[in-house]
Image (tube, helix red, strand yellow):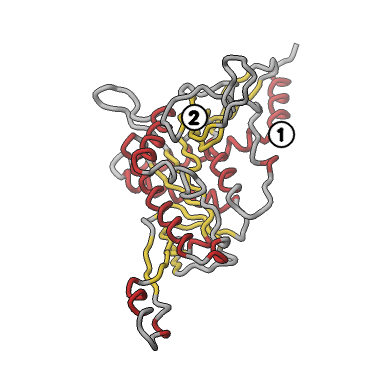
Amino acid sequence: MINNGDEIRQSYLESKEGDLTAYAGMIGAEFDTKINRLAQIIGRNHELSVGNYKESILRNCIRQFIPKRYSVGTGFIAFTRESRVTDVLKQRENNSDLLNRKELYVSKQLDIIVFDDYNFSPILQDAEFVVVRPESVRAVVEVKGYLNKKSVTDSVMSCIDLGRKWKEYREYNPQWERKKLPGLGLHLMGFAVPVNKKTKKPECNGEILRKTIVETYRKHLNPDELKESLIPLLKEAYIYNDCIVNNTICGQPDLNGAGIELPNLYGYSTNRGRFVRYNENLQPSLDRDKTIFSLLASIFTCLETPFNQDFSYVDQSCTLNVCPHEYGGFTELISGKEIAIYT
């Protein structure tokens, strides 16, 4: 029989074992501690300050984990195109000195920008505030203190605005210059969900988040634009410590057993936002937050650096069928239909 001292010793030894799942979960759990610590001091009267603090600690977290070639800031992406006056000047003679006139247009203000600071210096930089060229941008994160259907819609509309500017800029550049414009990883991180005063129900969940993303895209983009190769779409959205909504390609099951290979589907799926851990009896249970670490892993896939899979995918379960999310599901982007799939 193990006495109390032996139990304490065993617990201590287990705490010193290498555990990447625990390590990754601690990164996410730190956010809850920091946010609550500030809230305990200033209460509910300064939600804007708490929101700014959330953005700040998320920027610092990303900054700590990405390679030093990349920087993290907040601000704008500046695009250029030929000035409208250029068309007139081209019709005139002896105006070659004016043919290089450009118009400048910028994105909406972006909460978090991950950009290549090694090959492309910012156009403007003052502490964390930056204005950068699109060639330097690798990922953008929209941060929401509270997620409801309206804030999700607003975030997707911001993604559409940025995506269309990205597409226009890419098409404006000569063919040999287009290859310099990288892919763009768009992300949405929501830290909390408000409860409706009348219905007493949460105003957002994994299903509402997934369906609102699809509904907004289908309402404001045509079918051709819905192809990610034309306009960058939202890559991942998160409800902190709850769920992850992925832009993904999924296979269809052969429900009739006919042995017919069905085409893959393109859309958004909702998955668990916490790590799975197995106990000594191999029984799975949900552990700490997974959303922050998943955001870091997703940003890494947007960078031109070696991807460390061992430190990016550390869930103890390799399948989403273990401890599936309460609102798990898949919504096809083109049709908007809910479809039974396997991943």
* Quadrant housing residue 105: bottom left
Could you say which disc has been placed on residue 270 in the image?
2
User: 175 or 311: nearer the eye?
Assistant: 175
148 versus 133 height, above or below:
above
Mark whose residue sits in front, 2 or 1: 2
x and y percentages locating residue 233 in the rendered image:
46, 45
Q: Amino acid at mark 1?
A: Lys
* Quadrant housing residue 182: bottom right
Quarter of the picture containing the C terminus is top right
Could you say which disc has been placed on residue 16 in the image?
1
**Residue appearing at x 66%, y 28% in the figure:** 318
x and y percentages locating residue 171 in the rendered image:
47, 60
91 versus 255 height, above or below:
below
User: 127 or 17: nearer the eye?
Assistant: 127
**Left or right, 315 with reference to 60:** right
Numbered disc 1: secondary structure: loop
x and y percentages locating residue 120 in the rendered image:
55, 67
